[in-house]
Amino acid sequence: MTYRNPVIGGFHPDPSVCRVGDDYYLVTSSFEYFPGVPLFHSRDLVHWRQIGHCLTRESQLNLAEARSSAGIYAPTIRFRDGTFYVTTTNVSGIGNFFVTTRDPFGEWSDPVAVDHPGIDPDLFFDEGGTVYYTTSYRQGIYQSRIDARTGERLSEPRLIWSGTGGQYPESPHIYRIRDWYYLFIAEGGTEYGHMETVARSRRPDGPYESCPDNPILTHRSLLSPIQATGHADLVQTPTGEWWAVFLGIRPVGYPFRHHLGRETFLAPVAWMDNGWPSIGDNGRVAEAMPSGDLPLQPWPAPPERDGFDGATLAPELNFLRSPDRANWSLSEKASCLTLRGTPVTLNDGGAPAFVGRRQQHFSCQVSAHLSFVPSRDGEEAGLAVYMNEKFHYEIAMTLSMGERKLIFRRRLGSLQKVENEIPWSADSVEFIVRADQERYAFGFAGGDGETRWLGRGECALLAAEVAGGFTGVMIAMYATGNGAQSASPAHFDWFEYRGSD
């Protein structure tokens, strides 16, 4: 039996995993998007379903000042004595903190701040009850002891390892396996030189000796469809097998460009006779991998169309930064998501009226039905393919000089242009975005159901190598008053995502 990588597609970087009985729970980074820290559940490490987020309240997560690719970095999830812990860093706010719950399907606590510098925090519970907090800081891995109830630091942070010489040693995780403490870290930067290295010690606070076979996971200098592998976290199955989740990218074309973001991959971990680990096939992984003893148990496929019939948004939907509750509603109009445009546009580093989801497939079609009667020049609503405020495409309905129009616009760095526009008299429209590995096509359908196309945009121009940052493409419903508060509600009757990779 085999499985396919990535196991969680699209912008889901920095994965961390824990097991409780036969159940696995996984979290990833979320940066400037709200809610924060997506939470997934699996029974086999291969098939994952999103069950929510760990940070769902303003008291837990303030992203008002988060620039693009800031906000929430690299969480770690652990389970101890009936309690789940997730620790992470809000680089735009509180810094390092953790939240807890006894029910991962329920609410998580308010943040407990940890007075420890750095990013990418790890929580390690030693068998004697001591709790170690370890981060990436000043080009090294620093550790202190903390009180896991209060977050109080009980010792001064001290350097325990600097890695093997790669830049940006980060994402530490400590495990006790037999008589050794293993410290896994990523090096090389989260780019094409990314790699995973490991050291071990007889004590959790070191000194640590480096594995002679480092790096134990990397695709640097390989012509592989998977690149930039690293930032791994380990978990042991009930049958004793060890596996690693880690991030990687799937670039397209040459020179390489990736627009889906850093995704979550899975590979087996083997332990050598000398006690050192090896990930995948001697540090390499493939899109198709043997599943070993994993009891493959797919979840039912989620519905492709969201009719907004519930009291809450689906877990895969996100806001851009901290949302204003006055600008969106699921109850203003029955079975609709209503957005009210603000002065903030997609070109601003703020919080526009924006609800979107990650693009998880190279080939996909996203569509939404919009009912909208703009009454003031500049009001618009539609679908956006969004990387950040400087790189995005959108198709929208707007009012310009008293005339209602459908427009297709491209924003690429300092260049912005409405590429196409047509007059539109109806109060509703279906917008369609169709993607393959190289291009997006932007279309619409009216009452006759016939699709017409307004424009195209290259995927490569939204890639991280062009647009910068740590995120991936989001496809979103949005509304804006283009400098003014919009008086006209934009009602999205449904939103549909169909992946076809």
Image: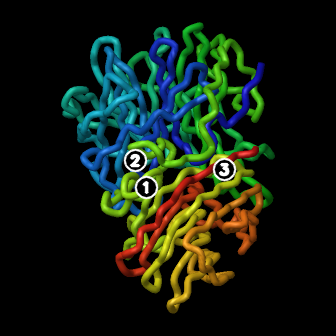
Q: Amino acid at mark 2?
A: Pro
Residue found at x 72% / y 43%: 226
Judged from the image, the secondary structure of the residue bearing numbered disc 1 is: strand
Label 3 close to label 1 by CB (< 8 Å): no
Q: Is residue 383 left or right of residue 461?
A: left
The label on residue 35 is 2
Judged from the image, the secondary structure of the residue bearing numbered disc 3 is: loop
Q: Of callouts 2 and 1, which one flags the residue occurring earlier in the amino acid sequence?
A: 2
Label 2 close to label 1 by CB (< 8 Å): yes
Based on the displayed image, in which of its 4 quarters is residue 344 positioned?
A: bottom left
Mark 2 surroundings within 10 Å by alpha-carbon count, few (fewer than 14), some (14 through 19), many (20 or more): many
Residue found at x 76% / y 65%: 450
- 3D distance between C-alphas at marks 3 and 1: 29 Å
Q: Position of residue 361 (x, y in %)?
A: 69, 47
Q: Is residue 339 left or right of residue 221?
A: left
Closer to the camera in the image, 300 or 1: 300
The label on residue 209 is none
The label on residue 319 is 1
